[in-house]
Image (tube, rainbow, N blue to C red):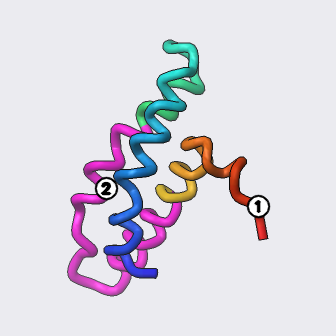
């Protein structure tokens, strides 16, 4: 999986995750931490891979963690069987 394919999937899951997070009680630690994480995603996706292998590796890993966060918070993780 490439950074481009990871980035392509992020906008659709972001919308779903935002709807789920907005259902949480605002002002709680859980809501604040998830909302803060959602707010950083557009900046992370817009950031390039960088000029070196190390920065590209870090960015692709970070996008993977972002996809996992979105899947866990979009409500879709419960619908998919874990294999």
Name the residue at the bottom extreme.
Answer: 53
What element does badge 2 sit on? helix
Task: Name the residue: 34% across, 44% down.
Answer: 40
Provide the secondary structure element on which disc 1 rests: loop
Name the spot of residue 46 as percent of width and height, x first. Answer: 22, 59
Give 51 or 3, whichever is nearer the viewer: 3
Find residue 32 and name its label. none
Residue in view at x 41 percent, y 79 percent? 57
> Image check: 21 left or right of 58?
right
Q: Residue at x 27, y 74 (%)?
A: 49
Please name which of the two marks, 2 or 1, marks the residue nearer to the observer.
1
Residue tagged 1: 81
Q: Tag 1 or tag 2, which sits nearer the N-term?
A: 2
Q: Position of residue 47 (x, y in %)?
A: 23, 62
Question: How many angstroms separate mark 2 from mark 1 (CA)?
Answer: 28 Å
Q: Quadrant of residue 15?
A: top left
Q: Quadrant of residue 51?
A: bottom left
Percent across and percent down for residue 54 are 37, 81
Quadrant of the rendering where the C terminus is positioned: bottom right
Local packing at callout 1 (Cα closer than 10 Å; few below 14, some 14-19, many 20+) is few
Q: What is the chief secondary structure element of the magenta stretch?
A: helix
Whether 41 is among the magenta residues is yes
Front in this rendered view, residue 64 or 50: 64
| 73 vs 10: above or below | above
**Residue holding disc 2:** 44
Residue drawn at point x = 26 percent, y = 51 percent: 43
């Amino acid at each position: 999986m490439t950074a481009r394919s990871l980035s392509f999937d992020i906008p659709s899951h972001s919308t779903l995750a935002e709807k789920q997070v907005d259902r949480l009680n605002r002002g709680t630690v859980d809501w604040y931490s998830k909302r803060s994480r959602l707010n950083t995603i557009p900046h992370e996706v817009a950031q390039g891979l960088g000029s070196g292998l190390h920065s590209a590796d870090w960015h692709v890993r970070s996008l993977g963690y972002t996809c996992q966060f979105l899947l866990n918070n979009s409500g879709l993780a419960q619908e998919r069987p874990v294999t």
